[in-house]
Image (cartoon, rainbow, N blue to C red):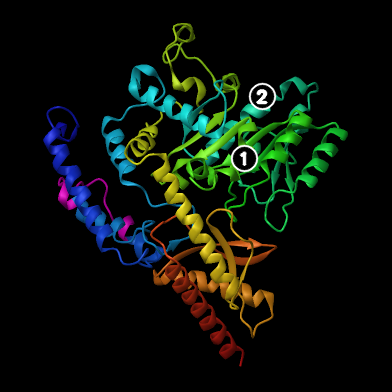
């Protein structure tokens, strides 16, 4: 069994095995004609449940053959131009190369004596990202598993920074976090994990443009103080999951300054604007935030996972610091030994920063930003198509690369019937494997969603998928009328 350990004696075995795996994936990518096969849970689950994990195959080729049947054949392929569903991007090759290297070397980014150069590369990328945000030299941050963890850490820091106002035993119940109704659900989840009360998150309404209404935010902050509560944090979103909308960051920053409230910007989606040659202005005001979430695995075209939480004042990261004699004893601080675990919620942690490092060193920031600009331009084309098509109702003009819309048949006026037609169309499209789209609710009604993150997608692809959606919806409505008659 030692022949399977990666070391100096098995380097050639490693090379052959990984090359065979890469060739399988490359062949699959080259031959993929649809984003999905349409396989059902009932069809796939028995095949996987039937595998006896106590009887190994003892052969790499046989294992890859089996993997092709169980996974590669029916995987949902984000690189396909008609995958239009969630915030999943096709990945760039330099990042995949970085993934290959980091998996083999297997550095753990918690302490210097486990990572050395990896620690310094991650710190340099945090410094670079902070500079792109507009933070000063006091900034810092750490890579995380994703936007939800980054938001959790930011709100942990906000809770701890609010402690000078905690003067009663019911202080936790008095803390309030403000987020727009279009914000990410991880804000509510984070509040619960942080021990805050059930009323801790105050939902602020959005306008027709799906951006937080600052007048409503000002009213809620004023009411919070008047009621003897503690305005702990405002979570502004730079790229909402449903609409790609960007909250008015400068106005929110002013309100946070007025009330002494922590300002967090969830830019998990919109962080691609940091390298955009043409749209960086949309993030004006983000430099005034106390903390920022970025997801490189969304708009920087990185493999999952690759995210970071950044803070304007590095000293606030002390709230995530714990020392253990067996790992990062306190003396290491005075010895200036850089242990990333001192600022992270995780202990053992992958060297995910290497993927972004390789991307920037091969492609450059402008190259990444140009790709993101392409999908934002495509979304505007898609919006024009939808706005001009009487079959569809589109919710809002996009700021980034998301389109929310629904099929509205001319002959049907029952809102519930329209909902069912759209739900059916999405499910039928997924089952066909011809395209994958997402869904959401707007004002209680069912809508469909395109999240455009593939520069290879064209306006023709969008038009073709719209025709497919309309066709499935019309088929459902026709069958419904037949049943009714």
Q: Main secondary structure of the magenta part?
A: loop
Q: Residues within 10 Å of mark 1 (few under 14, many from 20)?
A: few
Split into 4 quadrants, where in the image is the C terminus?
A: bottom right
Label whose residue precedes the other's in the sequence (2 or 1): 2
Q: Find out whether the residues at labels 2 and 1 contact each other: C-beta distance under 8 Å.
A: no
Q: Residues within 10 Å of mark 2 (few under 14, many from 20)?
A: some
Q: Quadrant of residue 386?
A: bottom right
Q: Quadrant of residue 408?
A: bottom right
Residue lying at the far front of the rendered structure: 278
On residue 284, which mark appears? 1
- Give the residues drawn in magenta, as a range: 47-62
Residue designated by label 2: 160
Magenta includes 55? yes
Residue at (25% x, 45% y) in the render: 54
Residue lying at the far right of the rendered structure: 226
Cα distance in 3D space between marks 2 and 1: 27 Å
Per the image, label 2 sits on a secondary structure element best described as helix
Regarding residue 289, the answer to whether it shows in the image is no
271 over 404 or under it: above or below: above
Q: Is residue 59 left or right of residue 204?
A: left
What x and y, as percent, mark residue 265? 61, 38
Residue at (57% x, 19% y) in the render: 318
What x and y, as percent, mark residue 155? 63, 33
Q: Nearer the viewer, residue 238 or 191?
A: 238
What x and y, as percent, mark residue 35? 37, 63
Q: Is residue 287 left or right of residue 60?
A: right
Magenta includes 433? no
Q: Nearer the viewer, residue 62 or 410?
A: 410
């Amino acid at each position: 069994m030692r022949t399977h350990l990666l070391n100096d004696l098995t380097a050639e075995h490693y090379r052959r095995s990984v090359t065979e795996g890469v060739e399988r994936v490359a062949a699959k990518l080259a031959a993929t004609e649809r984003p999905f096969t349409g396989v059902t849970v009932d069809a796939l689950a028995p095949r996987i449940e039937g595998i006896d994990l106590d009887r190994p195959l003892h052969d790499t080729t046989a294992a890859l053959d089996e993997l092709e049947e169980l996974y590669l054949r029916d995987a949902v392929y984000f690189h396909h131009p008609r995958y239009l569903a969630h915030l999943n991007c096709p990945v760039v090759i330099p990042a995949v190369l970085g993934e290959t290297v980091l998996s083999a070397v297997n550095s753990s980014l918690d302490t210097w004596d486990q990572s050395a150069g990896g620690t310094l590369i991650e710190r340099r990328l945090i410094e670079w990202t902070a500079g792109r945000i507009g933070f000063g030299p006091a900034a810092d941050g750490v890579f995380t598993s994703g936007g939800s963890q980054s938001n959790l850490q930011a709100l942990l820091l906000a809770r701890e920074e609010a402690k000078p106002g905690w003067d009663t035993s019911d202080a936790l119940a008095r803390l309030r976090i403000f987020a727009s109704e279009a914000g990410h659900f991880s804000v509510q989840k984070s509040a619960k994990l942080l021990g805050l009360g059930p009323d801790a998150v105050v939902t602020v309404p959005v306008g027709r443009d799906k951006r937080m209404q600052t007048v409503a935010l000002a009213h809620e902050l004023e009411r919070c103080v008047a009621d003897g509560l503690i305005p702990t944090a405002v979570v502004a979103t730079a790229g909402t999951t449903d609409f790609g909308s960007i909250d008015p960051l400068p106005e929110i920053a002013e309100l946070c300054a007025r009330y002494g409230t922590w300002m967090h910007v969830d830019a998990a989606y919109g962080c691609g604007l940091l390298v955009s040659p043409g749209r960086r202005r949309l993030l004006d005001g983000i430099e005034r935030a106390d903390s920022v979430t970025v997801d490189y695995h969304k708009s920087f075209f990185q493999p999952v996972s690759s995210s970071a939480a950044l803070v304007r004042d590095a000293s606030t990261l002390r709230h995530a610091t714990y020392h253990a004699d067996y790992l990062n004893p306190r003396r290491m601080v005075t010895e200036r030994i850089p242990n990333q675990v001192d600022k992270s919620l995780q202990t053992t942690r992958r060297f995910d920063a290497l993927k972004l490092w390789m991307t920037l060193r091969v492609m450059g920031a402008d190259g990444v930003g140009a790709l993101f600009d392409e999908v934002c331009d495509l979304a505007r084309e898609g919006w024009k198509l939808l706005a001009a098509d009487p079959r569809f109702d589109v919710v809002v003009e996009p700021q980034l690369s998301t389109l929310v819309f629904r099929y509205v048949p001319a002959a049907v006026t029952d809102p519930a019937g329209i909902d069912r037609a759209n739900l059916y169309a999405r499910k039928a499209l997924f089952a066909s494997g011809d395209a994958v789209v997402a869904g959401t609710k707007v004002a209680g009604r069912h809508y469909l969603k395109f999240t455009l993150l593939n520069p290879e997608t064209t306006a023709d692809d969008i038009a073709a998928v719209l025709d497919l959606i309309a066709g499935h919806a019309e088929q459902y409505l026709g069958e419904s009328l037949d049943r009714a008659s």
